[in-house]
Image (cartoon, rainbow, N blue to C red):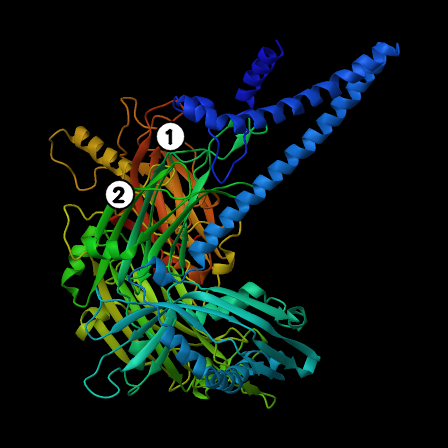
């Protein structure tokens, strides 16, 4: 009986014990059911082992059961109340629950640490390895690192000499409060720069150049101390870290020693730069420097190192130094930022119980050029239909980087990213695809990319102008047909700046004396110069303006013969109508030292479309000149496709976009916008003009005209006409527009049309810049006589265009809506200050509007 019982107990516990059986002799004991049937002999051989193990587990189970049952027996034996049992069980369960919670939290924490350890090991494995491990075309260069280590002390001596002989004098001249600036200590440290890998390009490069990318890493124990004795201020740098890809271009290759004409060094994109400052707050307390910040200082450093800026080292001659320092772009990338689908919904309601939509917008980067699209409210399938253009200096190794965000009041949520190699676009010329977004579970983006090559002859200009419809539109901006590169060399014999008591001699007398009178200092004049006159050396800088884009040079302090040696690039809408405006100004008094206007059409007849000479300045000294070199290039696709017309881009009213002021926000020396990249709700980059495309509103209007004419002979201007009065008040800086009436408008329905007039002062197409008349019901000859005003100065006025559209009013539920006609009014004429009343013919897109009658009259500013 006892043997059967023991066998039953052993059999009952064997299944429970088997899974938990520990490893014996390095091997796991498998479940009994997994074993094949064994022979009796083998069973007898294994019996002692299994019997001793099962016996041990049986005794353990018996002891546990006894420990649990004995207290109950003791309570009954000593006749204790059953309540003691309940109290004991309650205490036991409370302890068990508390201990279990602690064990659960501890296990979760251990699991979290294990996961973090695995992730850290994985990331370290992928990031710490040098690039030549991941990329087969990147080569290791330990021999070069050994060479740099050997040369490092001498490199440090060169850098110290550079700081003391070039940077220190430049800082002293930068501001009067920095006149006592000096470096008290310069120690670059004993940790040399490391090159983790080198990639040499063998495809898509010129035969006379060598291009290589260096993966550099510098973690230096640098110590640089500065002292401004005037303010008893000391600050410095404790350490510097730089990680990035530096491109080295050796060109041109020569057939004689040293075989290479020069070196160019630059970063394709911003490197990771970390500067550990000491005493920076002391510097910021100095008068005149309180606007500085750490980001601004880094932006200044970037402006010398990141493309298109570069460090150039000529090895033979200096005649081609400008070409090495400021090469022509390789091309222009036109980006049609069209639409997205299936984006992730980030907006949540009721604490996340209800998942809503997103308010997506995009940020695009090409090198240091940044664009930001408009925000589409509450949509997972947004349609932007915007166009941007970016200069590309080196297609190999560069990428178009796109990030999508959901706009929120506090912090914008990430919706996905995209990275496109520009070499692919360069080779294919035109790419129109849907791209899957990365770093997000869902979403795709529709882009059309075009690579525009540069042509040095004007043969293709007419074709390009027709393609972008710049030959018909009087707007000053839009999709580009040409690229203008201006090399600013120097100026000579600039006039000095006169401040102090001055009499009323005429302006020519002052110009002849080589002085510019600063009117901001005094308004009194007499017949002759006073004995108290005080002339000072100017601090000139240059404003360049083409269309709506203005760039600014660096300031050269206290000199009448400044040397700039700088380059500026402009994307031009129509070179046959636009001009380059040059204005030299004094930095301190903000007065004009000289002006110059060069029609871009002059370059079309020059050899290689290049003009280089010293130009005489107007409103300046008697012999004041500025030395410029201007080069024009026509933009076009090398391969001809079935349709080279740009995509339709519409504004919220369904009309085509008119001219916009800028194509990018580049981080040049004139713009420090890169530090604002992550600021919330940054103003979007205006899309390029799409009035040169054929948007839906224009197509509908053309179809309606065809139906109305029904095969009959059509007049030249069948859409009717509009009468406007336009005048600019220089005293109030106001543009006054009076909308009088319209005649012979087309009918939208059998009852006529409900027309109203919408006005924009381009390039401003914001809601605040929109003006709108009342709606006249069922009328084809409406009379408005309504006056509108726009804030614009006289200087800005000639760069603006008045956009007037006649539209059909509609209710929210009405399907009868759309465009009745459009007019673009050029404001560059001299008679704008006197005022004029004029009839304009309406057209589909505002182009080719001809005046019918103009009467100049004296207008009273209302």
First along the sequence among labels 1 and 2: 2
Query: Residue 120 placed where, x, y %?
Result: 51, 51
Foreground mark, 1 or 2, reads 2
Q: Answer left or right for 587 relative to 695.
A: right
Q: Which residue lies furthest to the bottom in this view?
A: 531
- Labelled disc at residue 809: 1
Query: Residue 66 placed where, x, y %?
Result: 73, 19
Query: Residue 645 placed where, x, y %?
Result: 21, 47
Residue that label 2 marks = 433
Q: Which type of secondary structure does the marked residue at label 1 adopt?
A: loop
Query: Residue 508 placed where, x, y %?
Result: 43, 83
Residue lying at 77% horizontally and 18% vertically, measured from the top left: 89
Q: How far apart are marks 1 and 2 (CA)?
A: 37 Å
Q: Looking at the image, can residue 318 be seen?
A: yes
Q: Quadrant of the N terminus?
A: top right
* Nearer-the-camera pick, 740 or 274: 274
* Nearer-the-camera pick, 349 or 730: 349
Residue lying at 26% horizontally and 73% vertically, measured from the top left: 210
Crowding around mark 2 (Cα neighbors within 10 Å: few <14, some 14 to 19, many 20+) is: few
Quarter-wise, where is residue 594 in the image? Answer: bottom left
Residue lying at 60% horizontally and 12% vertically, measured from the top left: 5
Q: Answer left or right for 446 relative to 168.
A: left
Quarter-wise, where is residue 525 in the image? Answer: bottom right
* Nearer-the-camera pick, 221 or 479: 221
Quarter-wise, where is residue 90 in the image? Answer: top right
Q: Answer left or right for 593 relative to 105.
A: left
Q: In this view, does 29 lie above or below 302?
A: above
């Amino acid at each position: 009986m006892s043997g059967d019982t023991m066998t039953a107990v052993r059999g009952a516990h064997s299944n429970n014990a088997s899974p938990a059986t520990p490893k014996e002799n390095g091997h796991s004991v498998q479940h009994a059911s997994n074993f094949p049937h064994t022979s009796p002999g083998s069973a007898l051989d294994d019996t002692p082992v299994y019997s001793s193990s099962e016996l041990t587990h049986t005794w353990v189970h018996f002891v546990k059961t006894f420990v649990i049952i004995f207290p109950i027996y003791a309570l009954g034996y000593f006749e204790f109340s059953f309540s003691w049992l309940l109290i004991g069980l309650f205490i036991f369960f409370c302890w068990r629950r508390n201990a279990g919670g602690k064990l659960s939290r501890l296990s979760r924490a251990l699991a979290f640490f294990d996961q973090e350890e695995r992730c850290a090991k994985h990331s370290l494995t992928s990031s710490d390895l040098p690039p030549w491990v991941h990329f087969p075309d990147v080569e290791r260069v330990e021999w070069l690192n050994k060479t740099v280590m050997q040369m490092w002390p001498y490199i440090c001596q060169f850098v110290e000499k550079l700081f003391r002989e070039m940077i220190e004098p430049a800082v002293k001249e930068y501001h009067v409060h920095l006149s006592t600036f000096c470096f008290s200590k310069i120690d670059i440290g004993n940790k040399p720069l490391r090159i983790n890998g080198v990639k040499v390009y063998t495809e898509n490069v010129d035969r006379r150049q060598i291009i290589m990318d260096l993966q550099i890493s510098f973690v230096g124990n640098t110590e640089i101390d500065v002292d401004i004795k005037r303010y008893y201020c000391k600050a410095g740098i404790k350490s510097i870290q730089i990680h990035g890809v530096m491109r080295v271009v050796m060109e041109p290759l020569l057939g004689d020693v040293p075989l290479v004409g020069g070196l160019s060094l630059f970063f394709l994109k911003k490197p990771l730069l970390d500067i550990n400052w000491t005493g920076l707050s002391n510097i910021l307390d100095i008068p005149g420097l309180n606007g500085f910040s750490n980001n601004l200082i880094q932006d200044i450093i970037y402006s010398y190192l990141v493309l298109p800026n570069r460090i150039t080292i000529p090895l033979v001659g200096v005649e081609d130094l400008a070409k090495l320092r400021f090469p022509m772009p390789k091309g222009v990338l036109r980006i049609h930022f069209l639409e997205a689908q299936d984006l992730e919904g980030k907006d949540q309601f009721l604490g996340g119980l209800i998942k809503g939509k997103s308010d997506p917008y995009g940020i695009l980067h090409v090198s240091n050029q940044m664009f930001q699209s408009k925000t589409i409210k509450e949509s997972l399938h947004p349609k932007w239909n915007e166009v941007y253009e970016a200069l590309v200096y080196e297609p190999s190794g560069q990428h178009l980087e796109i990030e999508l965000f959901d706009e929120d009041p506090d912090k914008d949520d990430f919706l996905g990213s995209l990275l496109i190699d520009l070499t692919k676009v360069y080779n294919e010329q035109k790419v129109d695809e849907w791209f899957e977004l990365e770093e997000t579970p869902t979403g795709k983006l529709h882009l059309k990319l075009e690579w525009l090559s540069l042509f040095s002859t004007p043969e293709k200009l007419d074709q390009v102008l027709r393609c972008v419809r710049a030959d018909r539109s009087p707007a000053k901006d839009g999709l580009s047909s040409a690229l203008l590169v201006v090399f600013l060399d120097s100026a000579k014999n600039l006039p000095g700046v006169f401040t102090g008591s001055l009499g009323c001699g005429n302006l020519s007398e002052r110009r002849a004396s080589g002085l510019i009178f600063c009117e901001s200092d005094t308004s009194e004049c007499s017949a002759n110069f006073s004995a108290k006159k005080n002339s000072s050396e100017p601090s000139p800088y240059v404003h360049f303006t083409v269309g709506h884009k203005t760039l600014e040079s660096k300031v050269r302090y206290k000199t009448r013969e400044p040397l700039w040696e700088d380059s500026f690039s402009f994307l031009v809408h129509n070179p046959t109508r636009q001009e380059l405006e040059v204005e030299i100004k004094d930095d301190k008094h903000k007065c004009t030292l000289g002006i110059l206007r060069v029609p871009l059409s002059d370059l079309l007849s020059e050899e290689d479309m290049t003009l280089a000479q010293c130009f005489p300045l107007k409103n300046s000294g008697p012999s004041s000149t500025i030395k410029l070199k201007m080069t024009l290039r026509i933009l076009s696709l090398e391969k001809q496709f079935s349709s080279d017309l740009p995509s339709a881009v519409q504004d919220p009213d369904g009309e085509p976009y008119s001219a916009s002021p800028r194509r990018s926000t580049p981080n040049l020396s004139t713009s420090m916008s890169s530090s604002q990249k992550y600021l919330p709700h940054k103003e979007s980059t205006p899309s390029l003009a799409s009035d040169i495309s054929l948007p839906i509103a224009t197509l509908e209007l053309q179809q309606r005209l065809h139906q109305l004419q029904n095969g009959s002979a059509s007049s030249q201007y069948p859409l009717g006409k509009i009468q406007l009065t336009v005048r600019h008040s220089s005293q109030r800086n106001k543009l006054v527009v009076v909308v009088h009436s319209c005649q012979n408008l087309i009918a939208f329905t059998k009852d006529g049309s409900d027309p109203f007039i919408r006005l924009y002062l381009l390039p401003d197409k914001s809601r605040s810049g929109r003006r709108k008349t009342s709606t006249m019901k069922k009328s084809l000859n409406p009379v408005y006589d309504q006056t509108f005003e726009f804030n614009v100065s006289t200087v800005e006025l000639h760069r603006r265009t008045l956009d007037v559209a006649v539209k059909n009013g509609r209710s929210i539920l009405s399907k009868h809506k759309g465009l009745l006609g459009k007019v673009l009014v050029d404001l560059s004429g001299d008679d704008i200050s006197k005022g004029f009343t004029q009839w304009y013919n309406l057209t589909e897109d505002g182009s080719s509007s001809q005046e019918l009658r103009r009467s100049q009259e004296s207008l009273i500013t209302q």
